[in-house]
Every structure is written in structure tokens, then in C-alpha cells.
């Protein structure tokens, strides 16, 4: 039978005692330290009860001494911090030093004060109070690093300078001429000492090495021989750390116990590294971003299944492959981990995290793309990876060409040269997997809707059973605090021949969920909307690489396979680029100030945000003009008085050799005067767009579009009927050469602006973080649309009338939902469109 003391479960021999027995035992207990003589006020302690009055100040001093005594007894063995301790241990120790823990207030007070003094917290998983890492190690490392950075600002030995140059190249840093780089490298050096000191202390508490001295580098060298652990091998940061002030470094080393006793060392080390390393330094060559715990848990549980070897390319601190808790030992933990990273510091942190959790593993400092399966000692059973996010354009050209060519040969695919580094990791990872093996990747979702992602999507369809794709809040903040990218989790399995026709779960996470909810959604989630997002089922055989997979996170099914493409009815073009909008887009005030003649300008609709609703009329243009907006595009014919290039024109302006002369040129003088005043104001010299057109002072001409739609934005795309002769520039797409009558065009616009049309459009956009979407020309041309030329007159007239009602509702700021509902119901009756929606919030 068990009983509880202060909320803790104890054995039969430790059942609650009467107050007289407790007091008797307390009288026989020695205090933690001798109190000063001279009538110091005391609580119930040795020698009986002191009935003398106790002042609040004296009581507080006594309580501080008792807290000191509790901490000393918990710590023991000359350690800086106590190992994790249970509530029972805390209360027994408090009782030993005279705290009456049977009194609720005293019990609560001693717990709060001890934890506050130590900066510990309760860990329910292990049933113990454990240290938090927090800000203290960051602050001590930064102070010590300041003393190192000062030394780096002076002349360094040539050998060290050369080794540091290699370190900068590896991490994509500038030279030491940058203060930010000096500070970053100094912090990395001091951090490496703390991490090694934590590993050293781990060996020390096992009796393998002597206690750490004030010369840690000497201790590390000795530990290398005693333990045969290669993590103690010297690398370039060691001579850098040697510049640290001894006292400042000593303070840093005190925090090794916080890491030693951490229950999630990979997470704590990752947090430390992220706090000490600027965002730009982590984004550079290695593209490093720490994996949030909930995501790493989901990936880890998907891949690991007990007696297995797991490969972690781009390991970092081991957030994906280190066991979930340093004090747990689960049957699902892998038997071995192979960690790969190019950064020696990352490998050191990953090695220490694995060691503290008792996980067998081997770290390799190499480029994963240079690693072959035969380089490993055993076959791989699963892969977890948060690969580098480095953009393709940021990779060294020779390196990019080499890996692109090599993986094209191995995959048989034509891989876009714009592919980011993470894509190459996915291609290469397949070589390590056998039938039934699993892989989980955390990457940006950019490739789902971009043209350069088609080869990767084709590869996934051909080589894997895709279990799930998980998108994290594309309309909100990135899960990576300093990386503006929509995160995507990809769960894959190397299939057998008969497993290709699997259902893929497209999971959209709009609100943060814990790991258990995420795992359930991936493995067993039902189709439809949830409290935190949505799940959509898609058969893998129904997917193609040309689709925008990002649109499939919406559980609305619309079959448009029987519909023609928009390009069959209209030409779609972007507006012409001006080269410098502020110079070539004019307000009425600009026109009036210079007297620019009417035949040297064309009416303009400049910005999508200036157009609201579903049509643009003469009155709208006039209101923009009166409001001072840019409503004119500079559009003169050839002027013989102006040189062929902006550069030559600028030279004439500077030398004051330009002077309008001759007959019939007076009406052009004002336009030339405007150009003379603005050629420098808007820096028109050397602008490639200006030099590559017939007349640098006039944007390329284009006819007036019949329909306008913005090129990018948030919240959908409105297709606007243009009832003016205003032209657009390159932030609009336009419909030209429309092969439809007026009623047919309005019916088409009703479809495009409907909920159905907007859902279909979503499949063809390219999504960026924050809900920003781009609608390309090719996507627009291939967009499935209704065929107005084959619909019956009643359907055409009803849709056209509904579009007129829709634009009237928008103009009068009335509710558009009734009209959109009417359009949706009418579209449902068109046989070529099949719609099935599980959406609760946005019915079609």
C-alpha cells in the first residue's frame, strides 16, 4: 500500500508520521550549516522550539540560509548544480534543514525559492525538477566572446588565418574585416568550449577523467587519450577560444551542468546556437534553421521503429535523430544513428546530444551529396532530415553544375538548375533506402508550385509512396522565426511494386498543434476540416508534376479535366515594363507642370490596389486623376532631338549642349524638358530595360487589355472588366484578342471570380510565406475554364447577369455572398464541372 506525503507517492515504510514523531526526528537532525550565535531567530530547528519573538527581517534571513542548505545538500560532490531531483527529495531535504514542509505555505515557499534560485523547472515526463538553459549561458558566452573578438581584430598568425578562411568559406561568412563575423566566430569558439566541457563532465561523473581544471583545453587533450572519443579532437575554433579571458571562460564553464542535466539536450543546444548566431550567418552557405520540437517529434516517430539505423543528413544539433528525452529509453528509439554535417561545430553538438541521451551513433564531417551508401558501416533503415535551405542561386556555380549533372545521371531526370540545395538532398537520399524504408524531410514548400519543382515532384511520384504532406500556416508567420518560408513536412516510404496507388494526406496546419495531434493526422486523420486546419485525401496516381500541389491542402475537390484552357479564348500577356515607373508614370500635376502634350501620353491604370471590385470605368480613372495618382504613361513618338541612349542624353544635359531647335519642335520641348529634369532624378542611365527598346524614353507599346488581373497578392485574384482605354504596366496581367462576345466574356468572368474559379486558380499559383501568391502567364493560359461558346443561352445569360450583379454589389459595398452563391449553384449544373466539397467554412 502506498501513501502520499506532500503530493508524492511513497512506500509502506514511509507512511505519514504524527507531528510529535516528526518534531522528534527534526530535533535529532543536524542543520545544513551552523547559524551565527547571538540569538538569531529560528524556526523549528535543532534543540527544541525557540519561543522568542521573530522579526520579519530575521525570519527572511533564516529562510535564505535554509534555502542555501537545501541547495547545498541537493548538489553535493562539489558540483555547481544539483542533478535532477524529485519532489520527495526536495521535501525531505527541506525537512532535514528545518523547514516545516507539512505546512502548505512553507512547502510551497521552499519549492518556489529553490527553483527560482537554481532556475529549475518541473519535468513531468521524468518526474523531476531539471535545470533550464534559458538566457544565462547566452549572456556568459557573449561576455567571454567579447574578449575573443578583440583579439581577432588584431594580426593573427598566418596558419590560423588560413584555417579561419576555410571556416568562413564553409559557413558562407565574409572575412574578419566584418565586426559581425568576428563576433559570430568568437561566440562559436566559446560555445564549442562549453559543449566539450559538458561532454568532459559526462565522462568525469563516470570516473573516466579527473575534474575539469581552469585549463580546459589541456583537459580535453588528456580526455582524448583516456576516452578515445574523437569529439575532443582539436579544430580551428580551439585556438580562437584560447583568446578568451580566463575568468570570463570560467563563468561559461559553470553552465556545463545545465546542459549535462538537460532532458532535451538537442533542443537546448540548438536554442543556444540559434541565439548566438545571427540569422544571416545561419542562412548563408549552410542554410541552418532549428527544427521545432513538435515537428521533430512527428518526423522521429514516423521513421524510427526500434532496431533500426537512422541517417540524419544535415544533422545540426540532432533535433531529428536524438531520442526524445535524455531520461527515457523507448523501444522505438533507433539502435544506431549516422549523423552527417559539414560543420565540425554542428557535429560536436550532435555528438554530445546523442551521448547525453545514451544513443549509439557515428558522426561524419562530410558533404552528404558526396556520401555513398557503401561508405556507411551498415544499411540505412530510415532518414530524417532538415536539409540546408540554400537557394540554387547562392550555391557556387561549379559545385551546382557538378551535383546537378551527377543527380541527373542517377535519376534520369532533367533537373532544373534553379533547384535549391534541399532538393538535391531528397534526390540523393533515395539511394540509401530499400523497400519499406521510410524518410521524413522538412523543407520549404516552394517547389510545390514552381516550375523548377516539377522534376522533384516527378521524382517523388516515381520513387516513393507519399504518405503525407504537411503545410504549416502559409498565411501567417513562418515556424522558423527568422526564415520567411512556408514549411513543408514530407513523409515518404520506399514502396514495393504494388504500393504505388496510395492515398496521400495533404494536411494543412493553420493553428499550432502538439506532436500527438500531428502524428494522428498524418497516420489516421479523416478527410475534412479540423479545429486546427484541414486534411485532404488525394490518390497518388491522380497527381502530376505540372499541378500546383500547394492548392491540394484545401479539402475541396473540383474535377476540371473536361474543361478547356483559358488560352483557347484569349491571349494573356503581362504589361510592359517601364524600366523606372516613377519616371514614366505621371500624375496630372506632372503633366500640368511641364505641359506635356496629349499625344505624348496614354491613359494608365498603374497599381492593382487602386482597382477595387470587378470593373474599371471612366469615372474610376477620373477619380484617380483627381486624387493625384499616376494616371498617365509617357508615350511620345520618336523625337529626333533626343539621342538614342539615356547615357548620351545625360552627357548632353551635363554639358548643356542640348538645345531644342528647328521648326515644328515646339510641342516636343516640354516633354524633352521633363526628361532632362528627370534623367538624373530617377537614375535612368544604364537601366537595361531602357537600352533594349526602340526608344529609351518611351515604354514599349501595347494595346488596351479587355480584362485586368493582378500578377501577385494575397486573398485571391479578381478579374476586372476594363471599360476604359487605359493601359497597364507589368504588375497586371491582361486579356487581349478576346475571341468571345460581350455576354460570353461576362459569363467567363463570373466563373473566374466565383469560389469555384478561385479554388481552381489556387492550384496554379505559386505560394510564398504570409499567403502571398503569384499567378504566372503560363499558369493563366493553362487555367481550366468553362467554354462559353458551347453553353446554352440561358446559362450564358444567367452567368453574365450574375457578373453584372457581382460588380454592382462590389461598387455599392453590398454583401457579395448571395451573388457568389448564385453563381456557384449555376456552375454546379454545368456537366463539365464536378464539385464535391468537405469545407465547412467556404461552401462552393
Image (spheres, rainbow, N blue to C red):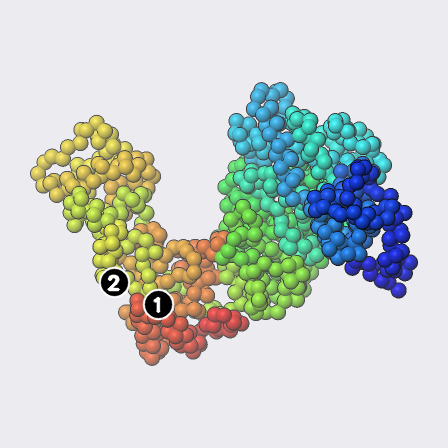
Question: Measuring 18% from the left and 39% from the top, which residue is drawn there?
Answer: 672
Question: Measuring 22% from the left and 36% from the top, which residue is drawn there?
Answer: 676
| Place of residue 534 in the rendered image (x, y in percent of width and height, measured from the top left) | 56, 65
Which numbered tag is attached to residue 749? 1
Circle 2 sits in a helix, a strand or a loop, which is it? loop
Residue furthest to the right: 13
Q: Above or below — where is 593 with respect to 104?
A: above
Q: Above or below — where is 80 with respect to 555?
A: above
Q: Is residue 528 visible?
A: yes
Question: Measuring 19% from the left and 29% from the top, which residue is drawn there?
Answer: 656
| Place of residue 524 in the rendered image (x, y in percent of width and height, measured from the top left) | 66, 66
Q: Earlier in the sequence, mark 1 or mark 2?
A: 2
Label 2 belongs to which residue? 617
Give yes or no for contact between labels 1 and 2 (Cβ–Cβ under 8 Å): no
Question: Measuring 73% from the left and 55% from the top, which residue is drawn there?
Answer: 105
Q: Is residue 328 left or right of residue 811?
A: right
Q: Is residue 118 visible?
A: no
Which numbered tag is attached to residue 731? none
Instruction: Using the image as rendered, state which of residue 748 and residue 43 is in the foreground.
Output: 43
Q: Residues within 10 Å of mark 1 (few under 14, many from 20)?
A: many
Q: Above or below — where is 365 with respect to 736?
A: above
Q: Quadrant of residue 726?
A: bottom left
Circle 1 sits in a helix, a strand or a loop, which is it? helix
Amino acid at each position: 500500500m502506498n501513501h502520499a506525503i506532500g503530493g508524492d507517492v511513497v512506500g509502506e515504510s514511509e507512511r505519514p508520521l504524527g507531528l510529535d514523531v516528526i518534531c522528534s526526528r527534526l530535533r535529532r537532525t543536524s542543520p545544513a550549516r551552523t547559524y551565527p550565535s547571538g540569538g538569531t531567530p529560528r524556526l523549528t530547528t535543532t534543540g527544541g522550539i525557540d519561543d522568542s519573538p521573530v522579526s520579519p527581517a530575521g525570519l527572511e534571513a533564516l529562510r535564505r540560509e535554509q534555502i542555501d542548505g537545501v541547495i547545498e545538500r541537493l548538489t553535493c560532490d562539489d558540483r555547481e548544480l544539483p542533478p535532477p531531483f524529485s519532489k520527495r527529495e526536495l521535501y525531505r531535504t527541506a525537512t532535514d534543514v528545518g523547514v516545516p514542509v507539512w505546512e502548505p505555505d512553507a512547502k510551497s515557499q521552499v519549492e518556489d525559492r529553490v527553483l527560482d534560485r537554481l532556475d529549475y523547472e518541473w519535468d513531468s515526463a521524468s518526474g523531476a525538477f531539471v535545470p533550464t538553459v534559458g538566457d544565462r549561458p547566452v549572456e556568459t558566452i557573449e561576455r567571454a566572446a567579447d574578449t575573443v573578438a578583440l583579439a581577432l581584430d588584431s594580426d593573427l598568425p598566418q596558419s590560423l588565418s588560413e584555417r579561419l578562411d576555410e571556416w568562413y568559406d564553409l559557413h558562407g561568412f565574409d572575412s574578419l574585416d566584418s565586426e559581425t563575423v568576428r563576433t559570430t566566430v568568437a561566440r562559436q569558439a566559446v560555445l564549442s568550449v562549453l559543449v566539450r566541457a559538458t561532454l568532459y563532465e559526462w565522462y568525469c561523473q563516470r570516473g573516466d577523467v579527473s575534474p575539469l581544471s581552469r585549463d580546459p583545453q589541456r583537459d580535453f587533450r588528456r580526455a582524448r587519450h583516456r576516452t578515445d572519443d574523437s569529439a575532443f579532437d582539436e579544430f580551428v575554433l580551439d585556438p580562437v577560444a584560447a583568446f578568451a579571458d580566463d575568468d570570463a571562460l570560467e563563468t561559461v564553464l559553470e553552465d556545463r551542468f545545465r546542459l549535462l542535466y538537460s532532458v532535451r539536450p538537442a533542443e537546448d543546444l540548438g536554442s543556444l546556437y540559434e541565439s548566438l548566431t545571427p540569422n544571416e550567418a545561419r542562412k548563408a552557405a549552410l542554410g541552418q534553421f532549428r527544427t521545432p520540437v513538435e515537428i521533430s517529434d512527428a518526423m522521429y516517430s514516423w521513421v524510427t521503429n526500434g532496431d533500426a539505423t537512422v541517417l540524419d543528413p544535415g544533422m545540426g544539433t540532432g533535433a531529428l535523430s536524438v531520442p526524445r528525452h535524455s531520461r527515457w529509453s523507448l523501444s522505438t528509439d533507433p539502435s544506431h544513428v549516422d549523423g552527417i554535417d559539414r560543420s565540425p561545430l554542428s557535429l560536436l553538438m550532435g555528438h554530445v546530444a546523442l551521448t547525453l541521451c545514451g544513443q549509439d551513433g557515428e558522426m561524419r564531417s562530410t558533404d552528404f551529396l558526396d556520401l555513398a551508401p557503401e561508405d556507411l558501416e551498415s544499411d540505412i533503415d530510415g532518414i530524417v532530415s532538415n536539409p540546408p535551405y540554400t537557394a540554387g542561386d547562392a550555391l557556387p556555380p561549379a559545385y551546382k553544375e557538378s551535383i546537378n549533372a551527377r543527380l541527373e545521371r542517377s535519376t534520369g531526370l532533367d533537373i532544373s538548375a534553379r533547384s535549391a540545395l534541399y532538393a538535391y538532398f531528397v534526390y540523393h537520399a533515395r539511394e540509401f533506402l530499400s523497400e519499406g524504408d521510410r524518410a521524413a524531410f522538412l523543407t520549404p514548400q516552394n517547389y510545390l508550385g514552381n516550375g523548377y519543382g516539377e522534376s522533384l515532384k516527378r521524382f517523388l511520384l516515381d520513387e516513393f509512396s507519399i504518405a503525407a504532406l504537411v503545410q504549416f500556416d502559409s498565411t501567417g508567420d513562418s515556424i522558423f522565426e527568422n526564415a520567411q518560408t512556408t514549411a513543408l513536412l514530407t513523409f515518404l516510404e520506399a514502396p514495393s511494386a504494388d504500393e504505388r496507388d496510395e492515398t496521400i494526406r495533404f494536411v494543412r496546419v493553420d493553428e499550432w498543434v502538439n506532436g500527438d495531434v500531428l502524428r494522428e493526422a498524418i497516420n489516421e486523420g479523416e478527410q475534412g476540416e479540423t479545429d486546427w486546419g484541414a486534411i485532404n485525401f488525394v490518390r497518388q496516381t491522380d497527381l502530376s508534376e505540372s499541378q500546383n500541389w500547394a492548392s491540394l491542402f484545401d479539402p475541396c475537390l473540383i474535377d476540371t479535366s473536361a474543361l478547356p484552357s483559358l488560352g483557347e479564348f484569349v491571349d494573356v500577356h503581362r504589361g510592359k515594363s517601364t524600366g523606372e515607373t516613377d519616371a514614366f508614370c505621371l500624375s496630372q500635376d506632372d503633366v500640368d507642370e511641364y505641359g506635356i502634350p496629349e499625344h505624348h501620353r496614354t491613359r494608365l491604370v498603374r497599381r492593382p490596389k487602386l482597382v477595387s471590385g470587378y470593373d474599371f470605368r471612366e469615372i474610376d480613372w477620373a477619380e484617380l486623376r483627381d486624387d493625384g495618382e499616376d494616371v498617365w504613361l509617357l508615350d511620345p513618338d520618336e523625337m529626333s532631338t533626343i539621342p538614342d541612349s539615356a547615357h548620351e542624353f545625360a552627357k548632353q544635359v551635363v554639358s548643356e549642349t542640348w538645345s531644342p531647335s528647328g521648326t515644328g519642335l515646339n510641342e516636343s520641348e516640354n516633354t524633352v524638358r521633363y526628361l532632362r529634369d528627370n534623367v538624373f532624378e530617377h537614375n535612368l542611365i544604364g537601366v537595361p530595360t531602357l537600352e533594349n527598346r526602340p526608344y529609351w524614353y518611351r515604354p514599349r507599346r501595347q494595346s488596351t487589355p479587355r480584362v485586368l488581373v493582378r500578377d501577385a497578392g494575397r486573398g485571391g485574384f479578381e478579374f476586372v472588366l476594363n471599360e476604359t482605354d487605359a493601359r497597364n504596366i507589368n504588375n497586371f496581367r491582361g486579356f487581349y484578342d478576346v475571341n468571345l462576345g460581350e455576354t460570353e466574356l461576362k459569363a467567363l468572368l463570373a466563373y473566374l471570380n466565383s469560389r469555384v474559379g478561385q479554388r481552381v486558380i489556387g492550384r496554379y499559383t505559386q505560394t510564398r510565406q504570409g499567403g502571398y501568391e503569384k499567378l504566372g502567364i503560363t499558369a493563366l493560359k493553362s487555367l481550366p475554364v468553362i467554354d462559353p461558346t458551347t453553353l446554352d443561352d440561358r446559362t450564358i445569360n444567367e452567368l453574365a447577369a450574375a457578373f453584372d450583379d457581382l460588380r454592382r454589389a462590389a461598387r455599392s459595398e453590398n454583401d457579395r455572398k448571395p451573388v457568389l452563391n448564385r453563381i456557384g449553384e449555376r456552375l454546379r449544373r454545368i456537366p463539365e464541372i464536378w464539385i464535391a466539397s468537405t469545407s465547412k467554412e467556404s461552401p462552393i
